[in-house]
Amino acid sequence: MARDNNVATTRRGFITTTGAGAAALAGCSALQPSSGEYPSQSITYIVPFSQGGGTDTYARKIMPQVSNEMDNGIAIENVPGAASLKGTSEILRAKPDGYTFGGFNPPSTPISYLVHQPEWDITNGMPVCTYARTPYGIFANPEHNIEGLKDLIERYQSGELTRFAGLGRGGIVNLAAIVMKNEYDLNYEQYVAYDGAGPAIKAAVSGEVPVVATTDTAAQSAVKSGDLEAVSILSSDGSSVFPEAQSPSDSGFSSIDYIGQLTRCMFLPPETPTDIRDTLAESVKSALQTDEVQTWSEETGNAVEYGSHERAKEALEDSINTIPDRVDMSKLRS
């Protein structure tokens, strides 16, 4: 995938800006649209996942600072369901006045879109910006004492482990599980789908399932508390949250980078005025550079990265155009 060449790193190095006109704007207020009237009422930010997951965690750290930058209230609304398509549909079908927007993450939601084939067109959404990249990983209940990806695969091959947990059927984690089953002989008998990272992680912590696949940010608290252990990070770029965890390629397996990492993006409904988009984008850019967000990023390892609306568009369209050429989507529709 092509990357923007114009990259600027701010004072702590935990946020980069990419795309056209990517100059650091720390301390600058967001520009108002030409009408000078937006925003004049509370804004709703839709998270198409349950509370407690990675997208929700980022929203609850970033949106208060966006609210401060805009001097306007922003309410976070969790709308889980249909492997993130329910909330995404609400974002795209909202009134295009700038008072409803939200975040979803290529290739995750685009995969759900390709599998379930809803009547609406996901590419009609207006990209606002990107704000982070997040890898997926495999995490296990410590009682099993799993030592890396090779050991995990051997446990499934022997029949010691039979259940593998992740997010909703037809989504990116389900796809990753199928890819690993085909490429790594990860022979689980049952894929257990949960409606969000929070419930899936709780199931692994309780012992309901032995292993869960989710983002590194979603699993961070459970690993820090000792309730889960990191088995593998599915992106060869690794994880800033779990820098010691090995990727499949580190463990001698083929890379699955094309589904191993999220690009976290924000979108508005189609036909929203571009000055409103630009106001939101500039506010997010400034919010990511605040001491509150950068300190959180530094302390947790949850790197934040600003990218232009062009970068968000590229991430979405690349997923829609590339995934079907790499994966037999019919296996997820059965």
Image (cartoon, rainbow, N blue to C red):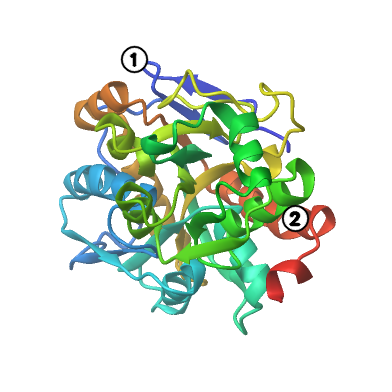
Count of numbered tags: 2
How far across and down, in percent of the image, does residue 310 sit? 60, 47
Quarter of the rendering containing residue 199: bottom left
* Residue 105 left/right relative to 257: left
Q: Residue furthest right?
A: 325
How far across and down, in percent of the image, does residue 46 sit? 34, 65
Q: Secondary structure at mark 2?
A: helix
Quarter of the rendering containing residue 216: top left
Against 292, residue 49 (above or below) is below
Residue that badge 2 annotates? 323
Q: Nearer the viewer, residue 8 or 333?
A: 333
Residue that badge 1 annotates? 11
The image quadrant where one finds the N terminus is: top right
Q: Secondary structure at mark 1?
A: loop
The image quadrant where one finds the C terminus is: bottom right
Q: Earlier in the sequence, mark 2 or mark 1?
A: 1
How far across and down, in percent of the image, does residue 268 sit? 44, 64
Give the residue type that dot 1 points to. Answer: Arg
Q: Please give the name of the residue rendered at 48% of the width and 50% of the height, measured from the top-left corner.
A: 265
Q: Nearer the viewer, residue 121 or 211?
A: 211
Disc marking residue 260 = none
| Residue 226 visible somewhere in the drawing | yes
Give the residue type that dot 2 points to. Answer: Ile
How far across and down, in percent of the image, does residue 122 sit? 59, 69
Q: Please give the name of the residue rendered at 37% of the width and 31% of the height, measured from the top-left corner.
A: 302
| Residue 23 visible somewhere in the drawing | no
> Separation of disc 2 and disc 1 at Cα?
36 Å
Q: Residue furthest bottom?
A: 119
